[in-house]
Each structure stands twice: as C-alpha cells, then as structure tokens.
Image (spheres, rainbow, N blue to C red):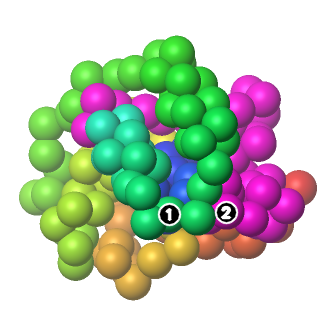
Amino acid sequence: MKIVLDTNVVVSALITPGGHCGVVLDRVLDGSDAWILTRSIVAEYVAVLLRPELPLGSPERQALISAVQAMDILPDPSSHSNEAKCVDGDDQPFLDAALCYGAACLVTGNRKHFPAQTPRCLRIVTPREFLIAAI
C-alpha cells in the first residue's frame, strides 16, 4: 500500500519504537508498504530530526536520515490545494504528495490539521487506524 507519513509519526516512531508509530515506520522501512517521499517531505523530516531538543540519540537520528535519503525521492508535486486544503499550511506538502502520487493513506497523529473530506479515496488515518486496516 502506498502511504505518506506525517513528520509527527516519524518522530514518535524514534521516541517510542515499540508503539504504533514505530510499527508503521518499520513497515515502510522493510518495504511492506510503499513510502511516498518527496523533496519537501524529506527536507522537513531532516530539519525536525536534527532539532536538538528532541529526546533522540544521535545514532538513531542519523540512521533514519541516511535511510530516508537513500530511498527514491520523488519531485515535489504541484499544489493540489484546489482539491483539498490543510488547516496548517505546513502540512500541505504531505497532502499534495498523497494526492499526486496515489497514496491510499496519509498517516498522522494530527488528523485535525487535514481536511475531513479528501478526494480520490485518500484516507487520513492515525497510526493505530492504519495498523488495524493493514492487518
């Protein structure tokens, strides 16, 4: 299944590896699900993961940054904001990537930042909801 992961899911996965976010991250890293990554998404992941205030060890941060940068990174899509608009503009690149590249799900811990209705069968789900559907 093709999915987009919001930054909060990636960060939470590193903070609590055994939690729902950690399992979702493991699924994309092992290839069970296809992780849609664009230049903007990767840039945000890197910027957030390098914040010193996050309770993450350096090896974990760098290992994930290296893994993400080694994956296929797609060009940023043109905006799909005429189809669906995010409450928080910083989340728009995630929604645009999901719509442009045909994601089945956008996985986030902040569903309220995304529109309640989305076009093209895209589902906005929490990590827990994603895992329930994936099993």
Give, as a three-letter code, the residue at label 2.
Ile
Q: Earlier in the sequence, mark 1 or mark 2?
A: 2
Residue 81: name its quadrant: bottom left
Q: Is residue 41 visible?
A: no
Residue 21 falls within the magenta-colored stretch: yes
Q: Secondary structure at mark 2?
A: helix
Mark 1 to mark 2 CA distance (whole Å): 9 Å
Q: Is residue 128 above or below residue 13?
A: below
Q: Is residue 61 visible?
A: yes
Give, as a three-letter code, the residue at label 1.
Leu
- Return the residue at label 2: 15
Q: Is residue 110 above or below residue 74?
A: below
| Closer to us: 38 or 54 | 54
At a point 85% along the width and 61% down the height, the residue shown is: 18
Question: Quadrant of the image for the C terminus?
Answer: bottom right
Q: Is residue 112 above or below residue 91?
A: below
- Return the residue at label 1: 54
Label ID, residue 68: none
- 40 lies left or right of 50: left
x and y percentages locating residue 47 in the rendered image: 32, 46
x and y percentages locating residue 38 in the rendered image: 34, 32
- Specify the segment rendered in magenta: 12-41
Kindly indicate whether the residue at mark 2 contacts the one at mark 1 (C-beta within 8 angstroms).
Answer: yes
- 109 lies left or right of 22: left
Residue 39 falls within the magenta-colored stretch: yes
| Closer to us: 19 or 72 | 19
| Closer to us: 53 or 103 | 53
x and y percentages locating residue 109 in the rendered image: 54, 73
